[in-house]
């Protein structure tokens, strides 16, 4: 018996610190999870409920063990093209995706309030992905493309490693272009000189070499890299502002 208890504790995730909630509370939360969200009527699974850390921990473990559609019932429903054998209208699917966005954001806020920042980030990131689908279904293609760019560059602030990769790809790609152009031009560069030129141009501090005119390929490459660098820097700032200020 003691061995079973010890094994059970070892299997628990490190962030779980509270004892498991009572069966009656589990049943109550399970009924909430089964609630179909309705934006127009203001119906959401945990609306008006105060979740304790123990509640949130149990919900997370339930999600990890049982998966979709129990803990993501609203998102699962939104992704279904039919309901009761009938094809959903575009309006219905849009409303369901909007409900899924709100549900993920509500859960992220609840997790963050309990100090579970990593788990909150996971659901907040999921909400951003779903919001992008909402933009597409609303026909807001400008916002959709900008959202896609923020995801690719930094994962909306939740995947900062992507920003480093994007930065290095641009820097070394243009360094290679400068080196290739140098072979056919009067100006010759070593690899380290091309790297310095690429970094300077990326940050908008490029400089022209001797015997290089404004119509030269070097100048055109420098301008292209400066514009691309500005776009990446603006996207980077917008991404992390959106995350850390909860926008």
Image: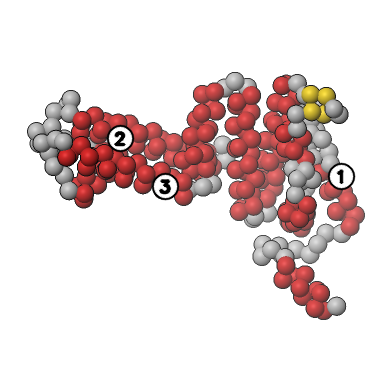
In front of the other: 239 or 85? 85
Residue 12 sits above or below residue 37 on the image: below
Query: Dot 2 corresponds to which residue?
Result: 225
Residue drawn at (75%, 38%) of the image? 76
**Real-space CA distance between mark 2 and mark 1, rounded to the nearest whole angstrom:** 55 Å
Residue drawn at (82%, 35%) of the image? 36
Q: Is residue 112 visible?
A: no
Disc nearer the start of the sequence (3/2) = 3
Q: Is residue 174 visible?
A: yes
Q: Label 3 near label 1: C-beta < 8 Å?
A: no
Query: Dot 1 corresponds to which residue?
Result: 31
Counting every numbered tag in the picture gives 3
Q: Position of residue 11 (x, y in %)?
A: 72, 67
Which quadrant, please, contains the C terminus? top right
Q: Secondary structure at mark 2?
A: helix
Query: Dot 3 corresponds to which residue?
Result: 165
Quarter-wise, where is residue 108 in the image? top right
Q: Position of residue 186 (x, y in %)?
A: 10, 36
Disc nearer the start of the sequence (2/1) = 1
Residue drawn at (24%, 47%) of the image? 195
Mark 2, residues whose alpha carbon is within 10 Å: few (<14), some, or many (≥20)? many
Side of 29 where 119 appears, left or right:
left
**Real-space CA distance between mark 1 and mark 3, rounded to the nearest whole angstrom:** 44 Å
Residue drawn at (54%, 46%) of the image? 158
Residue 13 sits above or below residue 233 on the image: below
Q: Secondary structure at mark 3?
A: helix
Quarter-wise, where is residue 243 in the image? top right
């Amino acid at each position: 018996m003691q061995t079973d208890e010890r094994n059970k504790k070892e299997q628990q995730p490190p962030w779980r610190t509270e004892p498991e909630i009572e069966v009656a509370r589990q049943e109550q939360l399970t009924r909430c999870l089964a609630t179909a969200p309705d934006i127009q009527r203001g119906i959401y699974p945990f609306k008006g409920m105060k979740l304790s850390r123990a509640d949130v921990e149990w919900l997370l473990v339930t999600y990890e063990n049982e998966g979709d559609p129990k803990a993501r019932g609203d998102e699962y429903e939104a992704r279904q093209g039919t309901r009761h054998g009938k094809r959903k209208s575009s309006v219905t699917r849009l409303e369901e995706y909007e409900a899924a966005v709100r549900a993920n954001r509500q859960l992220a806020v609840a997790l963050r309030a309990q100090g579970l920042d990593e788990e909150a980030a996971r659901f907040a990131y999921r909400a951003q992905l779903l919001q992008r689908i909402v933009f597409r279904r609303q026909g807001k293609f400008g916002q959709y493309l900008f959202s896609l760019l923020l995801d690719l560059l930094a994962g909306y602030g939740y995947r900062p490693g992507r920003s480093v990769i994007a930065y290095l790809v641009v820097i070394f790609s243009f360094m290679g272009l400068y080196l290739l152009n140098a072979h056919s031009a009067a100006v010759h560069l070593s690899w380290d000189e091309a790297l310095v030129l690429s970094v300077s141009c990326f940050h908008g501090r490029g400089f022209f070499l001797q015997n290089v005119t404004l119509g030269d390929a070097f100048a055109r490459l420098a301008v292209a890299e400066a514009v691309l660098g500005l776009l990446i820097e603006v996207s980077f700032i917008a991404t992390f502002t959106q995350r850390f200020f909860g926008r």
